[in-house]
Amino acid sequence: MKLGKLIESINGKAPEASPSLPECEVDTFVIDSREVKTGDVFFALSQPEYKDNGFNGEFDDATSFVRTAFDAGAAACVVRPDRFEEHREDIEEFRDRLIFVDDSIAALQALAHEVYLEWNRPVVAVTGSAGKTTAKELTAHVLAASGRKVLRNIKNFNNGLGHPLTVLRLAKEPDFDIAVLEMGMSTPLHEIARLCRITPPDVAIELNVLPVHLEHLGSIEAIAAAKAELVEGMKPGGTAILNADDERVAAMAAMSKGDVVTYGIENEATVRASEITVRGFGETTFTLTIGNEVAGVTFPLNGRHNILNALAAASTGHVFGMSTDDIAKSLSSVAAPPQRGEILRFKKGFTVVNDSYNSNPDALVSMVSMLCDSAPADARKIVVAGEMLELGPDAAAIHRRVGKDIASHKIDMLIGVRGFGSELVGGAKDAGLLDAAFAADSAEAGKLLCEKIRAGDVVLVKGSRGVRTEKVIEAFLENFELEGENAAAAE
């Protein structure tokens, strides 16, 4: 892409640009000055953009790093005029390579939309209150098995910055056949609608609507409306893939601008799983039915929630013309994304399920149920659960209720971590669980569990990113040796 086209795409102004600048070819766009390489374009983000685009917290003014970006070889930098005035003394000399915009995040998104339009291939978008990353990875895996080259967002690149940065990869690597992109939200600022304007989905996958982000959205109805923006933002004539087992998701069929494909376990659906059998950690079998076609699946992930994620992926494969047999084969070779249900087996004889990426009440109880269903009958079942964030004014009561639910699954030990983790412990004790303890932070929880662990135990570690329950996993890895394939993967 020529810089002249970039300037036009983002409605930028470059009044003092050198005559050669618009003809400069660029294909890499960054927001971290430490990542800038020769020929890149640096977008200098600042607090006003973050606030206007729904990002909570205080952020550095990246205009102060414009000089650093040019020193690293940047071809141009995108800045706000008011931020330039504040930093004029430091960056005045670069005026001939500065592009001025009113909002650098909006400019980044506009550029991503332009790159998407030039690429002009199908987009599959995934949202839901839980399971987005796993469903995205499963969907990408299934579609890749059909021979397609699949672009997908990495890490947690599912917001107003991560999404456009993912799409902008297409400027340098346009040979992807399809994009599978998760879309997240946490505020009432129509985040999913904004993402859909960047890349209107050809296929919109809705996983579930759960009581998360209540602190910002206030009610489950508001959460459902925010998630429904994905179906509303779908291309006319596209396909909505909806979870028939979630009534709020199923109701979104009325909003579809095209076809509807449903999936489920309990309710009638286009794509279904039946005859589910859990043989142990890392092996669940079920029968996959799509229309009149049936195939057996040996699935390496555990839990009903992961089967539903697999059905969402299977539905996408079906939409893109894959046979039921081919879909079943692809699902048999998947792996859990890091920190999302990955199974770690240790030489000492205990097993840990690492689900440290995120947590909410429904997801936590679902994972506890998975633990109890998958563990050997004689195993000690241990849960390490971090406090759940953004639950609003009823957070304490919600944690206490969930603690009771956890204890009702007949686990043997609970460690609640940080803050409202004490309410999890209190609720579990109210329900009769004797071995329940509170840890002030994840490091303390890791130390406590390392002292208590023994051969034969099965452990679930579940927490939100803010609680850092991955520190419990780090404590295990420091004190105990992994076995077999786990050890090789960790090297």
Image (spheres, rainbow, N blue to C red):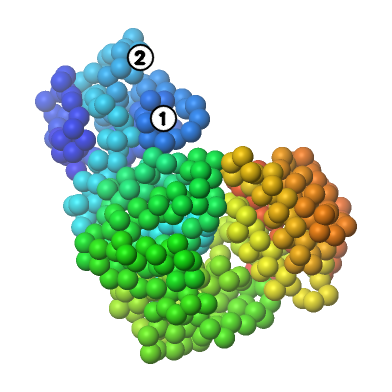
Q: Is residue 104 above or below residue 217?
A: above
Quadrant in the picture for the C terminus:
bottom right
Q: CA distance from mark 1 to mark 2?
A: 20 Å
Q: Which x, y percent locates residue 213?
A: 52, 45
Q: Residues within 10 Å of mark 2 (few under 14, many from 20)?
A: some
| Disc 1 to disc 2: CB gap under 8 Å | no
Q: Which residue is mark 2?
A: 87
Decide which of tag 1 and tag 2 comes sooner along the chain: 1
Q: Quadrant of residue 335?
A: bottom right
- Residue 147 in sight in this render: no
Q: Which x, y percent locates residue 338?
A: 57, 57
Q: Quadrant of residue 378?
A: bottom right
Q: Residue at x 67, y 73 (%)?
A: 281
Q: Quadrant of residue 16?
A: top left
Q: Is residue 161 above or below residue 224?
A: above
Q: Which x, y percent locates residue 1?
A: 19, 43
Q: Which three-letter amino acid code belongs to the residue tagged 1?
A: Lys
SS for dot 1:
helix
Q: Single out the mark in the foreground, 1 or 2.
A: 1
Q: Is residue 133 above or below residue 17?
A: below
Q: Nearer the viewer, residue 456 or 52?
A: 52
**Label ID, residue 101:** none
Q: Which three-letter amino acid code belongs to the residue tagged 2?
A: His
Report the side of 337 relative to 142 (left or right): right
Q: Which x, y percent locates residue 267?
A: 48, 77
- Residue 200 in sight in this render: yes
Q: Is residue 31 above or below residue 81?
A: below
Q: Residue at x 49, y 71 (%)?
A: 245
Q: Which residue is mark 1?
A: 51
Q: Residue at x 44, y 68 (%)?
A: 243
Q: Residue at x 37, y 62 (%)?
A: 252
SS for dot 2:
loop
